[in-house]
Amino acid sequence: MEAQMAFSIEIRNSWLIQTPSSSSSSSSNALSFSRSMLPMAGAAERRRRWRQCAERRPRMNPAMAAAVTERIVRMETEIEKPVKFTVRAAATVRRRRKEDVKGMIANQIDAYSDKIGRNVVLELISTEIDPRTGAPRTSKRAELKGWFEKKDTKAEHAVYTAEFTITSAFGEPGAIAVLNRHHREFYLESIVVEGFGPDPIHFTCSSWVQPTRIHPNKRIFFTNKPYLPSETPPGLRMLREKELRELRGDGTGERKLTDRVYDFATYNDLGNPDKGAECARPLLGGEDKPYPRRMRTGRPPASSDARAESRVEYPVPVYVPRDEAFEEGKEEMLSDGALKALLHNLVPSLVASISSESIDFKGFHEVDNLFKEGIRLKQTLQDQLLQKIPVVSKLFESGEALLRYDNPHILTKDKFAWLRDDEFARQTLAGINPINIERLQAFPPVSQLDPAVYGPPESAIKEEHIAGHLDGMSVQQAIAKNKLYILDYHDIYLPFLDQINAQDGRKAYGTRTIFFLTSLGTLKPVAIELSLPPMGPNCTRAKRVLTPPTDATSNWLWQLAKAHVCSNDAGVHQLVNHWLKTHACIEPFIIAAHRQLSAMHPIYKLLKPHMRYTLEINAIARQILINGDGVIESGFTPGRYCVEMSAAAYRDHWRFDQEGLPADLIRRGMAVEDPTQPHGLRLLIEDYPYATDGLLLWSAIERWVHTYVSACYPSVHHVQADTELQSWYAESIHSGHPDKRHAPWWPRLSSPADVASFLTTLIWLASAQHAALNFGQYPLGGYVPCRPPLMRRLIPIPGDPEFENLTADPHRFFLSALPSLTQATTFMTVIDTLSTHSADEEYLGERPEPDAWTGDAAMVRAAREFAADVRRAEEEMSRRNSDPQRRNRCGAGVLPYELMAPSSTPGITCRGVPNSVTI
């Protein structure tokens, strides 16, 4: 009777006083017990409360203490008789929308196997340790029910249930184990468990669960409650460490597509030496050619070169961990793009193979016809083509239009805008590559290359070349007033020009272009310098300066010079700013995050949407884009030297501490620090659409990350004591960027402010920066004369035989310097796919489970505020695009700048900021 009576014990000084619990209130030092607390309060929690009470009072004499202890133990034993209760789990499984016959049969087999006991079983795991076993408390296994009954459902999602009988000693669930005894893998989106209290417990899984015949071990999923390593409940500590060990692997063996192992490797898979020396490519990564590291596949070495990894050709998949592979919606988008690419490129390629006739564009009308009518063929060529591949006849319609290309945005408002100097200049601020323009701070510009090899470092541009275009100012006055800007592609191209120009049909210069900022806030080009490697001392042909035209001939020379600048800009954009900085340099941080940050770590939860699809798209890029004879080598002027130029840019210029937007703007001289301004800096070109819109998103990301990190880390000590965070950062540098591991500029990660700054930059690069550089490729670059990715001719000078060809037929000469029909259509098809949003895109501020991605309710609310910030930024961008004072984004024939606008519909829209690098 005494044990059943609810009571409280108060200890005052050394006296023990027992008082009935019928009193209306009790002291804050009282310990109270009630059977109603048993399901949620385990023995460990009750012992903690007793200790808390005891610590607040002076020690009693030993005899009294022994009596109290005996009484507590006897009462606790009587009170702790297990109370059983039932909890229910609901598991959401995403089904494939489209199944082939093999898949449908496999589904039926699994359904019938489930009926006879080859099923999926769950097991709850407590946050507490069972003192009898020293291991976490676990429930009995429970089978997922409903698999057989729902075998024929057509819905995209199916929910299956399981019931557990739990005792009050179990404590709080912290993880759930899943064992798949079916024949086939399935995609587990989430599990929700109800019955432990008023609120359900969420397990966000988002993972493929392999059958036991492939991976016999149980899969462990943690609740959405975040824990720093030091805060991990006792029952989850070993599981947390075990899960990370499995994700790291042992660094040996060839990976299977069903694996979940993350590891590093060098870029030694871009060439195929087994096909011959001409197909070999240098290894990227190491002292000779520094480069970031990629995902390790463990494939065997090539037969002819042990340093090179054997190749797997697309569409055979390259290994990425199973959960990194594209989901069905993304696969469908790429399949549609691949089909379009096949059809678009099939006819030009076949024409080239069966016809000795030149396939250069004969006039601008032939370029325009790609968007109006498709590819038109002479009847004789069409007959030859149909004889070679009769099935192609289905693609023809009475010998007329074939495979029309979508009209690029750049042609929609003013078809001839690309010819104008102001549009050429505007695109340096609001085009597809707005991050290379710099303020000119010294005149003449000076090269950083070795003058013993590359000649005098000073530019050939003199004051007399540009003085007449500076509104009456001298050069020094214009520099002092921040009026001169430069697009400098001299040093990055010059070391490779001998090799580039020795290739068939590839011609390039090292270029410098100087712009003047007008009183209207727009830029105008005032000089273009074209440089070649000097053939000897005092070589006069090595550097050539062109200025805005004054007659018909100089106009065509000027147009050719602008085309070479645009070609160089396209190469740097694709090889350095896009591929290197937002794809390759991000990958090591993603690999290390999976290896070192537990899924329950709050920083992992923050980063998860910003890592989606990146490893898969980078693996495909190694197969078809940056590989030897791939799309980039074929389509851009540097040819087989493309990735070597990318490696040189990484070696000489990449610094993580300068990759954030404010730091980059200040480095390029486009802004100065100014604490009175909204973003802490002042732009020197006020109407700089990339920068003004980018700062809106940068600030929104920065506020969100600062709020989140401050909640995770109340002090410097918490940051420095976080072993997973520090291991992630160290491995990202030492294993992911080992060729730069000794660089002094790596930011420290010692305080909450350090962490917030680092994460803001990382999220910016994966989301807004990548979007600004990617989704305008076809809309702004799909009209090849506007932005040729490849040039095939140098610019002739008077006296050259080629000069006569230029003056005799300037249209045809200009077009002959651009990519051929086959090169142009291949390039257009690829950037069409690269510019496309898939239907399953997740945009900045969005999460697939906005209320369940974390168990921290305050951070759920903060994420909603971040989403609202992003929406407000989008509204401001829309307003700016309607402001006639902003002439770089509004005006007659001027495209609005929307590449930073966060939302988008599927397809090619020239807008939309996905959370991650998804294409």
Image (cartoon, grey):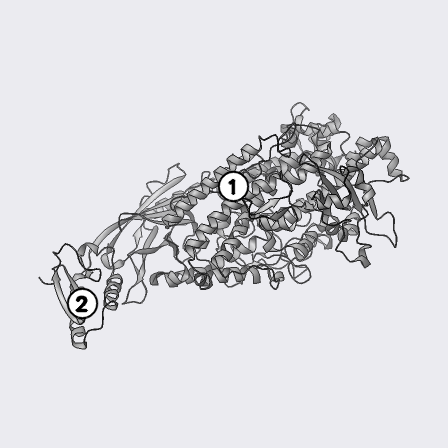
Whether 81 is drawn above or below 397: the answer is: below
Callout 1: SS: helix
Please identify the quadrant where the N terminus is shown.
Answer: bottom left
The residue sitting at the right extreme is 799
Q: With 328 as the anchor, is 854 left or right in this view?
A: left
Compared to 853, does 51 lie above or below? below
Along the horizontal axis of the image, is 709 left or right of 88? right
Left or right: 285, with 334 as reference point? right
| Image coordinates for residue 570, horizontal then vertical, percent | 69, 43
Crowd band around label 2 with a 10 angstrom C-alpha radius: few (<14), some (14–19), many (20+): many
**Residue at numbered disc 2:** 11
Amino acid type of disc 2?
Ile
Q: Horizontal and vertical percent for residue 811?
A: 79, 31
Measured as percent of width and height from the top left, residue 823 is found at 71, 39
Determine which residue is flagged by label 1: 330
Q: CA distance from mark 2 to mark 1?
A: 66 Å
Disc 1 crowd rating (10 Å Cα; few below 14, some 14-19, many 20+) is some
Q: Secondary structure at mark 2?
A: strand
**Which is more foreground, mark 2 or mark 1?**
2
Which residue is nearer to you in this view: 232 or 613?
Answer: 232
